[in-house]
Image (cartoon, rainbow, N blue to C red):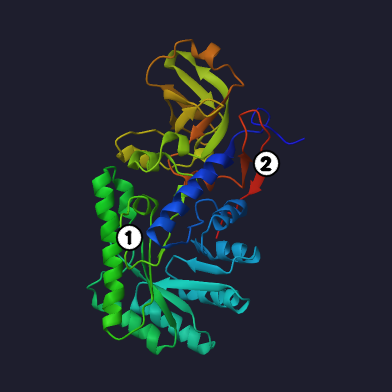
């Protein structure tokens, strides 16, 4: 007999399938309306049933953050894969093996040295790698500036080395720090304009640069115009999380991932409820602490998913979580949350919390319905 939310061992990662499918359809429809392909970043779920649902809704290809993800998805029959982390020389043999087996794996680089390593290795092994150049659109992380002299040098190295320059790609990671609609729209336009400008600069130099790939969940859902863009990569939208809720791109009802936990004790004089979901379940991610609303380690919900306003997982040890209340509960905590009570915790960062588990438990009925195990990939 399949377990239910009332019998499942805790802590456990739960996926609300109805809400997940709603999120998938929401993003896919938006990309369809804007006239671009959606290449979802699967690092959020690392779960084949989730990825299958994204592809079934209309996604074209996938984005991965590890070559292990690429191998896992390719073994499942997914051929079009973008490895969206700058490739290091030591990983090129693994990439070559995947391509020789039929995976249409594409690589990225943001340096002349990296481009030269790809070209040299490809030449030695008679392989014409597909390569994207990463662009820095907001100073958040990696990539080349549009005006950087190295941009054309990288493109030229790939071209003369016989590689296939697929295009330019970027990620407006600073969107996670915003919460104003106008600011999000402005950054979405900046992301688009900068990446398109990089492609145009390469084209004006007489080199082919057919594709422009951008993406983050906040900018994808805030963009008004994606002229010149061919595809969007976004990932966390499939589950959403409290950071995205604070950014303002999803409602409380759209959070599809939670952690099922059980009350294991109380500290009555402190007003604490102790649960069996500590940071080993929730992760150490405290991404909401710098936003307008700090949710601690997560928002506490009843078993049916209803938010318990003012209740949060404010402290976390390895296996112990501490639930506190902004206002004293109407009833004594021992009677309102007796030992054995089941609660759900919404995470700050879905990617980080998901990574704590080897599987998800998916449900698509009410809180008393059966749950089904979906395996999840971990590691590199």
Residue furthest to the left: 147
The residue that disc 2 covers is 372
Q: How many marks?
A: 2
Mark 1 crowdedness (10 Å alpha carbons): few <14, some 14-19, many ≥20: some
- Front residue of 34/63: it is 34
Q: Is residue 126 above or below residue 112?
A: below
Residue 201 vs residue 171: left or right? Answer: left
Whether 73 is drawn above or below 247: the answer is below
Q: Is residue 362 above or below residue 44?
A: above
Residue 200's spot in the image, x, y percent?
28, 76
Residue 246 point in image, percent of width and height: 35, 39
Residue 12 can be seen, yes or no: yes
Figure quadrant of the N terminus? top right
Q: Residue at x 27, y 54 (%)?
A: 187
Q: Which residue lies at the image location 31% right of the left edge and 65% below the top edge?
A: 227
Q: Nearer the viewer, residue 72 or 380?
A: 72
The residue under label 1 is 141
Which residue appears at 54% of the width and 51% of the height? 45
Alpha-carbon span between mark 2 and mark 1? 38 Å
CB within 8 Å, label 2 to label 1: no
Q: Which x, y percent locates residue 274? A: 52, 24
Q: Is residue 7 above or below residue 77?
A: above
Reading the chain from its start, which is encountered first: label 2 or label 1?
1
Q: Which quadrant, please, contains the C terminus?
A: bottom right
Secondary structure state at the residue bearing disc 2: strand
Q: Which is more foreground, mark 2 or mark 1?
A: 2
């Amino acid at each position: 007999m399949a377990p239910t939310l009332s019998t499942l061992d805790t802590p456990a990662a739960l996926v609300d399938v109805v809400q997940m499918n709603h999120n998938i359809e929401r993003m896919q429809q938006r990309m369809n309306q804007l006239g671009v392909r959606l290449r979802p970043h699967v690092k959020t779920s690392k779960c084949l049933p989730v990825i299958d649902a994204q592809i079934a809704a209309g996604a074209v290809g996938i984005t991965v953050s590890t070559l292990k993800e690429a191998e896992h998805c390719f073994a499942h029959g997914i051929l079009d894969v973008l490895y969206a982390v700058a490739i290091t020389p030591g990983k090129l043999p693994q990439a070559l093996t995947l391509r020789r087996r039929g995976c249409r794996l594409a690589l990225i680089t943001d340096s002349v040295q990296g481009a030269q390593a790809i070209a040299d290795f490809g030449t030695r092994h008679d392989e014409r790698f597909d390569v994207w150049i990463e662009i820095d659109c907001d100073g958040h992380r990696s990539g080349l500036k549009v005006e950087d002299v190295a941009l054309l040098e990288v493109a030229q190295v790939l071209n003369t080395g016989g590689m296939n320059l697929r295009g330019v790609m970027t990620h407006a990671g600073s969107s996670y720090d915003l919460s104003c609609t106008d600011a999000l729209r402005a950054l979405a336009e900046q992301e688009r304009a900068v990446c398109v400008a990089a492609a145009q600069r390469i084209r004006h130099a007489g080199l082919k640069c057919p594709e422009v790939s951008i993406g983050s969940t906040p900018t994808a859902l805030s963009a008004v115009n994606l002229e010149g863009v061919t595809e969007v990569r976004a990932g966390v939208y499939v589950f959403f999380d409290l950071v995205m809720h604070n950014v303002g791109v999803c409602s409380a009802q759209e959070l599809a991932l939670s952690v099922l936990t059980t009350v294991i004790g109380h500290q009555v004089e402190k007003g604490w409820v102790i649960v069996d979901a500590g940071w080993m379940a929730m992760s150490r991610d405290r991404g909401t602490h710098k936003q307008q609303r700090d949710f601690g380690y997560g928002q506490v919900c009843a078993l049916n998913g209803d938010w318990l306003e003012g209740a949060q997982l404010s402290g976390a040890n390895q296996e112990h979580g501490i639930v506190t209340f902004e206002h004293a509960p109407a009833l004594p905590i021992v009677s309102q949350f007796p030992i054995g009570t089941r609660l759900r915790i919404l995470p700050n960062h879905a990617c980080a919390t998901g990574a704590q588990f080897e599987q998800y438990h998916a449900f698509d009925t009410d809180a008393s319905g059966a749950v089904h195990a979906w395996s999840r990939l971990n590691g590199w």
